[in-house]
Every structure is written in C-alpha cells, then in structure tokens.
Amino acid sequence: MIEFKDVHFQYGSLLVLDGVSFHVNRGSTKVIMGPSGTGKSTLLKLMLGLLKPDAGQVIVDGVDVGQAKRSEMNDVRRKIGMVFQDGALFDSLTVGENVGYSFLERGGMPIDEVEAKVREFLAQVGLDPGILDQLPDQLSIGMQRRVAIARALAACNPEIMLYDEPTTGLDPVTLETITDIIVELQEKMHMTSVVVTHQIPDALKVGSSFLILAGGKVVFDGSAEALAKCTIPMVMSFLEPFKKTLRASFTSLHSELGN
Ligand SMILES: Nc1ncnc2c1ncn2[C@@H]1O[C@H](COP(=O)(O)OP(=O)(O)OP(=O)(O)O)[C@@H](O)[C@H]1O
Ligand SMILES: [Mg+2]
C-alpha cells in the first residue's frame, strides 16, 4: 500500500533521510520510532505528498507521489486520514463543527444530516455525542485526540490512517483508549496505518511491524519478536529504557494469545 524506495530528503543543507526503504502492507500497521528530530514526521509528510523526495520514490497505492500530477495527488490524499502531532483542532469551532468540517465545507448536506454523521463518527471513537456543542479547550487532551481521529475519519472515509504521536502527553488510561481505537479501526475497517510513537509498550499492541529510524537510515524493520531479540547496538540502546516494560508486555501479549 505504501512503499519507500531509497528515499533521500533534505531541508536546505540539513540531510534528514539518507536512503530510506520500507513498505507497509495493505491492512497492516507500521509503527515508526526513533530519536527526536530523525525525520519521522517528515516520512508522514512525504506520504501525504506535502514534501517530495530529492531522490528515490514514495509510492502510495500505486501512485508515485514525487511524479504525480495534482489531480492524481488529490485522489491519493482523499484516501488518507491524518492525525497530526498536536491534535490540531480548530479552537474556535465546536466539536461538531470540527468533526463535520469537511461536510460543511463541501456544502449541500442538510445540517441535521451533518449532525447525524458527526454523532456517528464520535460514537466510533467512543465519545458521547452530547459533547457536540463544546469547544475543544473544554475537553481533556485525550478527548481532543479522539475528536481529531473522528475528524480524520469524517474527512475522507480513509483507507490509510497516519498518526503522528497520537498518545504523547496522555495519562496511562487515556493512552490505552487511544491505542484501542487504533487497533479497532484496523480490525473493523481493515485500515492500513502508520503510527509514529515514543510509547514503546503501546506500539507493541498496535504494530504489525516496527521501523526504527536513526541518523537518516532505517536501523531496524521487522516484527515485535525480532525487535525484542535485536542485538544491533543502536536499537538496543534505544530500547534500553523500555526493556522491562517490553518484556512485561511480551509476557502479557503471549498469555493473551494463549501461549
Ligand atoms: N520545515 C522545515 N525546515 C527545516 N528543517 C526542518 C523542517 N521541518 C523539520 N526540520 C528538521 O528536520 C529534522 C527532522 O524533523 P522531523 O520533524 O521529521 O523529526 P521527528 O523525527 O518527527 O522529530 P520529533 O520526534 O521531535 O517529532 C529535524 O532536525 C527538524 O528540526
Ligand atoms: Mg515529529
């Protein structure tokens, strides 16, 4: 569904991606991790076609993003829902207006129909439709993130969801809710997802495969099991602070699976 082939990218003289290759299979979830400033958000922007590679190819659902005409790129973007790093809701619009934004913008849909749609999408992310008239800053951060996911779903009925650090800054309970929503969307709607995160234990819960980016290169790309066994020094030092939780979540993951 998504493929990076030897992608190079730099901002001015700052080289960020130095030959990055990987793919994300249809219906799977790729978790992207790595130190701050290594280019994780940049990878997502390349997938959306907001940036173009300097060399190499970014292919999304068969379309080469670097070469695509504007109309082709619009078709690609219509398949992608994006949840930005800071949640990015419109502060001055109500929850209902935020989620229903794309319907309101397109026009033509009667307001009670828009409201029904909004209620449906709020329910999909486990939110009480009663919050429709509230403003984002009246909600907890966790609820704001859920509204952001609902808005991304409403915007285009996406086949691909990109999440940039969806759980950063959340308390453990809310964090789990967001993780569950990501898993549910994948299972129910067979969504292809890319999740950038620092929360390793939760990453294990959502990911079909894991990619670690560092120094402009892919230093690891593989399954959770391979990750736990990985002996590449850079990967080991990156995972070190999480080793305990990593082992613990493995044990619970395995007992959940019944082995
Ligand atoms: N528009 C820009 N112009 C110039 N440099 C940029 C721009 N956007 C990002 N950078 C730089 O490029 C590098 C990669 O940025 P990016 O945001 O992709 O990193 P990241 O892995 O998402 O980091 P974080 O974990 O902090 O979110 C960083 O050094 C950043 O400062
Ligand atoms: Mg980032």
Image (cartoon, helix red, strand yellow):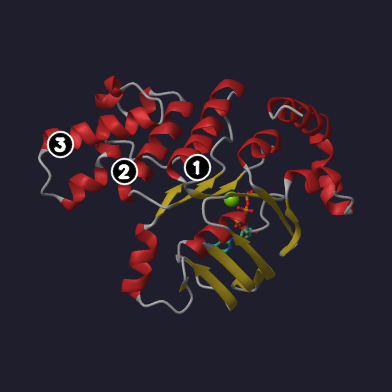
Q: Position of residue 6 (x, y in %)?
A: 66, 74
Ligand 1 - quadrant of the structure image: bottom right
Q: Is residue 100 above or below residue 159?
A: above
- The residue that mark 3 highlights is 113
Residue found 10% across the figure and 49% down from its top: 108
- The residue that mark 2 highlights is 154
Q: Position of residue 51 (x, y in %)?
A: 49, 68
Judge from the rendering whether residue 1 lies leftward or rightward of residue 131; answer left or right.
right
Q: Is residue 193 above or below residue 17?
A: above
Q: Amino acid at mark 3?
A: Glu
Residue 93 position by quadrant: top left
The mark nearer the N terminus, 2 or 3, is 3
Q: Secondary structure at mark 3?
A: helix
Cα gap from disc 3 to disc 1, whole angstroms: 27 Å
Of 147 and 121, nearer the camera is 121
Are circles 2 and 3 on residues that touch, CB within 8 Å?
Answer: no
Tag of residue 186 = 1
Q: Secondary structure at mark 1?
A: helix
Residue 94 seen from this side: no
Q: Is residue 5 above or below residue 201?
A: below
Residue 13 seen from this side: yes
The residue mark sitting in front, 3 or 1, is 1
The residue mark sitting in front, 1 or 2, is 1
Q: Position of residue 3 (x, y in %)?
A: 57, 66
Residue found 45% across the figure and 40% down from its top: 87
